[in-house]
């Protein structure tokens, strides 16, 4: 037998992916009417902690704990058991878990399991029975698309402060 090392010319083929260069702006971004399951979606799973600034995502789903500032995102979903602490400027927000901070959204849906502490600035607001909100609500004139005003949903009435006090 020979004592020379055995050599082979075997070289596995590794498929090459096209280079994707992220760009700013709406070029290449799905339209607002596109399915929320498509596009740039970031999911922070249970038992995961994330801190920082998040931008340019179509959907952020919080199942764990996120401490962040969100800009240029279309939709924020805080799932039951999830916690978001910080500021968020989004088109649409659905809160089922805990939200602490400032939320600015064209449309906000607060599910019955939600616990919110902070300020919500909204164009359209839907609150289910059982949700807890501590803080302030501020309506922004002209950002309501009217879709939340129709249908069969429960309403919440917030009494105004009397001028007598």
Image: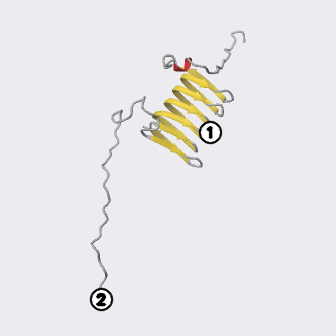
Q: CA distance from mark 1 to mark 2?
A: 67 Å
Could you tell me if the residues under marks 1 and 2 are in contact, i.e. CB atoms within 8 Å?
Answer: no
The residue carrying pointer 2 sits among few (fewer than 14), some (14 to 19) or many (20 or more) residues within 10 Å by Cα, namely few
Is 87 rendered above or below residue 138? below
Q: How many marks?
A: 2
- On the image, the x and y values in percent for residue 55 come to 44, 38
- Residue at image x 54%, y 23%? 122
Secondary element type, mark 1: loop
Q: Nearer the viewer, residue 155 or 117?
A: 155
Is 40 rendered above or below residue 161? below
Q: For residue 80, which numbered disc appears in the image?
A: 1
Q: Quadrant of residue 32?
A: top left
Looking at the image, the residue that sits furthest to the front is 152
- On the image, the x and y values in percent for residue 125 come to 57, 23
The residue carrying pointer 1 sits among few (fewer than 14), some (14 to 19) or many (20 or more) residues within 10 Å by Cα, namely some
Looking at the image, the residue that sits furthest to the right is 165
Q: Nearer the viewer, residue 43 or 89?
A: 43
**Horizontal side, residue 147 vs residue 82: left or right:** left
For disc 2, the marked residue is 2
- Residue at image x 31%, y 82%? 5
**Horizontal side, residue 46 vs residue 23: left or right:** right
Looking at the image, the residue that sits furthest to the left is 9
How is this picture coloured? secondary structure
Is 131 rendered above or below residue 38? above
Q: Nearer the viewer, residue 147 or 115?
A: 147
- On the image, the x and y values in percent for residue 39 come to 42, 38
- On the image, the x and y values in percent for residue 62 come to 55, 41
Secondary element type, mark 2: loop
- Residue at image x 56%, y 17%? 149
Q: Quadrant of residue 11?
A: bottom left
The quarter of the image holding the C terminus is top right
């Amino acid at each position: 037998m020979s004592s020379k090392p055995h050599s082979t010319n075997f070289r596995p083929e590794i498929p090459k992916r096209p280079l994707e260069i992220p760009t700013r702006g709406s070029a290449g971004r799905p339209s607002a009417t596109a399915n929320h399951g498509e596009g740039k979606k970031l999911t922070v799973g249970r038992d995961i902690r994330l801190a920082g600034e998040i931008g340019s995502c179509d959907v952020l789903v919080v199942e764990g704990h996120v401490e962040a500032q969100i800009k240029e995102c279309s939709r924020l979903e805080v799932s039951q058991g999830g916690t978001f602490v910080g500021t968020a400027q989004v088109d649409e927000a659905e809160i089922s878990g805990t939200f602490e901070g400032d939320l600015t959204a064209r449309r906000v849906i607060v599910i019955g399991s939600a616990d919110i502490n902070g300020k919500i600035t909204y164009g359209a607001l839907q609150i289910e029975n059982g949700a807890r909100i501590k803080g302030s609500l501020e309506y922004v004139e002209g950002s309501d698309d009217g879709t939340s005003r129709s249908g069969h949903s429960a309403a919440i009435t917030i009494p105004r402060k009397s001028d007598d006090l």
